[in-house]
Image (tube, rainbow, N blue to C red):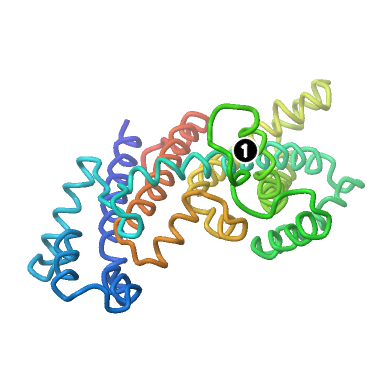
Amino acid sequence: MRFFVRRGIFYVVTLWAAITINFFLPRMMPGDPISALIASKQGQITPEQAESIRVLFGLDSEQSLWQQYTSYLGQILRGDLGIAFSQFPTPVSMIIKDTLPWTLGLVGLSTIIAVVIGTSIGTYIGWRRGTKADIVLPITTFFSSVPYFWFGLVAILVFSVTWKIFPSSKGYQPGLVPGWNWEFISSVLWHGALPAITIVLSSIAGWILGMRNMMVTVSSEDYVTVAQAKGLSEGRVMVAYAARNAVLPQISSFALALGFVVGGTLIMEMVFSYPGIGYALFQAVQAKDYPLMQGCFLVITLSILIFNLIADVVYAFLDPRTRQEG
């Protein structure tokens, strides 16, 4: 029980620190969204109008930074993420609600596919080490060393420009009305195919190598040797004895990967102009949109902490040694 209490306190403190950094970091950036808005209007906004806009968004000089911080904490507790500067008067929560499903659907599913396929291949080549199966290793090493943005650009050049097999950008065909109908769903799947393939190919190498190395280590353990001496089938020993223990580090890595599904998609969504939360964050940074940046960062932070907590709980039940008191 003390293990879970300590972990709970750790995550609460981490969440508070992340929220605090989330508030101060955008305000340390040079400039502000109101100045950018005034510059874009080229003298159409008077000083009095500019001051009114600052008051409206809580950026007036009469409100101290501490007052803004306490007000921000109060808004977070109420679930109010504010109004987006760049898309006024749309609430930040509405923008996140619209963009988050795109990211979770594409990157989440792609990550799960990469984990399942990579862990399965890593299990086999780790058990069959020293055979022709090891030819997979240099191939996976190559894919893991290629920067994702370059890989995505090459995929667009080959499959969208040269061969015109997949669309190069957007989440669905322009002009379609989103809805639960086959025309829209098929368009979403077709537009998401190329980003999904590049995500799987660029991330699967890490899962293969990680599982393969753990299988090599675990296969020399005594309990594996005893299982083989009992005359159990090779497949059962590989799966029920070796892979069962080798997969434990993969679980922690998988939880981290799920947490970064929300935050690790910025480059992918920029390359493919995909309408997810990463692209919304990119646009918010360009516009110095404090509320939208803070909302996106908060969702990213929460997702990472939640999946890390889930990983700690699952790992504690799978491996009781982690619950031993220090």
The quarter holding residue 21 reads: bottom left
- The residue lying toward the viewer, choosing from 1 and 53, is 53
Q: How many marks?
A: 1
The image shows residue 195 at horizontal and vertical percentages of: 66, 50
Give the side of residue 2 with respect to residue 281, left or right: left
Residue at (28%, 51%) from the top-left corner?
Answer: 89
Q: Nearer the viewer, residue 161 or 69?
A: 161
**Which x, y percent locates residue 22?**
31, 59
| Above or below: residue 224 compared with residue 88 | above
Residue 49 position (above or below residue 73): below
Residue 210 visible (yes or no): no
Amino acid carrying mark 1 in the image? Ile
Quarter of the rendering containing residue 172: top right
In-image side of 209 versus 318 (left or right): right
Instruction: Answer few, some or many: residues within 10 Å of disc 1's Cα (few below 14, many 20 plus, some between 14 and 19).
Output: some
Quarter assignment of residue 150: bottom right
Q: Looking at the image, can residue 313 be seen?
A: yes
Farthest-out residue, front: 44
- In the picture, the quarter occupied by the C terminus is top left
Q: Secondary structure at mark 1?
A: helix
At a point 28% along the width and 54% down the height, the residue shown is 19
